[in-house]
Image: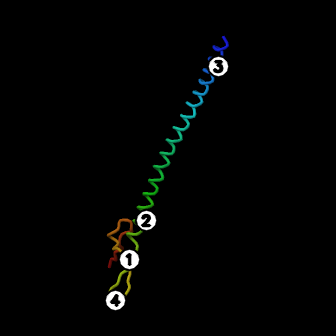
């Protein structure tokens, strides 16, 4: 009879362990989902930063030379949608 009690006790221990492991697995899976979301957010922010840097580069004056002198070339106001429209003068 003693062996039966030992088997029953061990099964109870294993059942408790299985419940704990199930709970921990659910926590790990939930955290992994959160990390996937955080990774997506960081990727989007990085893309936005790159796009902002590219836009800033596109509107930045470019060094050049004209008639042997150093000049800065600036994009025409109508060529860049991020810049305000050209001012027109009316007579």
Above/below status of 67 relative to 50 = below
Label 3 SS: helix
Tell which circle, 3 or 1, labels the residue nearer the N-terminal end. 3
| Marker disc for residue 52 | none
Dot 2: few (<14), some (14–19), or many (≥20) neighbours within 10 Å? few
Q: Residue at x 40, y 69 (%)?
A: 57
Q: Which residue is mark 2?
A: 53
Q: Which residue is mark 1?
A: 62
| Nearer-the-camera pick, 38 or 88 | 38
Label 2 SS: helix
Above/below status of 61 relative to 67 = above
| Nearer-the-camera pick, 47 or 26 | 26
Distance from the alpha carbon under mark 2 to that under mark 3: 65 Å
Tell which circle, 1 or 2, labels the residue nearer the N-terminal end. 2
Q: Nearer the observer, disc 3 or disc 1?
A: 3
Label 1 SS: strand
Q: Are marks 2 and 3 in contact (CB under 8 Å)?
A: no
Q: Position of residue 81 (x, y in %)?
A: 35, 65
């Amino acid at each position: 009879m003693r062996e039966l009690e030992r088997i029953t006790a061990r099964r109870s221990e294993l059942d408790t362990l299985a419940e704990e492991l199930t709970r921990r697995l659910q926590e790990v899976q939930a955290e992994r989902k959160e990390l996937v979301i955080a990774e997506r957010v960081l990727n989007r922010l990085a893309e936005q930063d790159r796009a902002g840097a590219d836009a800033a580069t596109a509107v930045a004056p470019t060094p050049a030379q004209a008639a042997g002198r150093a000049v800065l070339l600036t994009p025409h106001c109508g060529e860049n949608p991020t810049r305000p429209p050209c001012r027109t003068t009316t007579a």
